[in-house]
Image: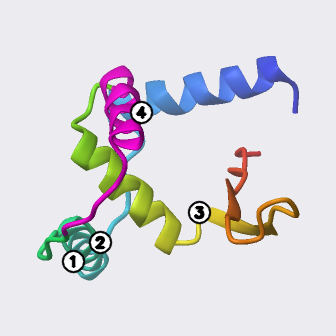
């Protein structure tokens, strides 16, 4: 499918949604399941206290400022992505074996 075809298809779907021709089908049970999953994902019921270098904290604060979010939210998001499997362990560096290396998993582009 060419880029123009995708654009036309996206435009047609959006127009159908705006005019009311396209109505999402979501059962009450499925909606309740999604709401519960969202609540469990967003619930932050534990506090932690960590020590990090001032240099690392300043780096996190700069990134958060650039993203327009509080730095605590950025840290929480990074931790969530890590435990959810969005970061991939790629081994340790040969020169410094005590430092593990990580990278973000590539996101799949929609077809």
Name the mark nearer the viewer: 3 or 1. Answer: 3
Name the mark nearer the viewer: 2 or 4. Answer: 4
Mark on residue 59?
4
Q: CA distance from mark 1 to mark 4?
A: 35 Å
Q: Residue at 53% across / 33% down in the picture?
A: 13
The residue carrying mark 1 is: 36
The residue carrying mark 2 is: 34
Q: Is residue 30 magenta?
A: no
Q: Is residue 105 left or right of residue 67?
A: right
Q: CA distance from mark 4 to mark 3?
A: 21 Å
Point out the stretch of residues depicted in magenta: 49-67
- Asked whether disc 1 touches disc 2, contact meaning CB atoms under 8 Å apart, the reply is yes
Q: Position of residue 38 (x, y in %)?
A: 26, 67
User: In this view of the protein, which residue sits in the foreground, 57 or 84?
Assistant: 57
Nearer-N-terminus badge (1/4): 1
Nearer-N-terminus badge (4/3): 4
Nearer-N-terminus badge (2/4): 2
């Amino acid at each position: 499918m060419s880029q123009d075809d995708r654009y036309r298809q996206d435009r047609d779907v959006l127009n159908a949604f705006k005019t009311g021709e396209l109505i999402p089908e979501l059962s009450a049970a499925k909606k309740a399941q999604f709401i519960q999953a969202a609540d469990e994902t967003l619930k932050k019921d534990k506090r932690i206290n960590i020590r990090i270098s001032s240099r690392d904290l300043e780096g996190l604060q700069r990134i958060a400022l650039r993203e327009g979010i509080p730095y605590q939210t950025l840290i929480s998001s990074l931790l969530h992505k890590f435990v959810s499997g969005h970061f991939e362990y790629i081994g340790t560096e040969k020169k410094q074996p005590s430092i593990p290396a990580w990278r973000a998993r590539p996101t799949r582009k929609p077809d």
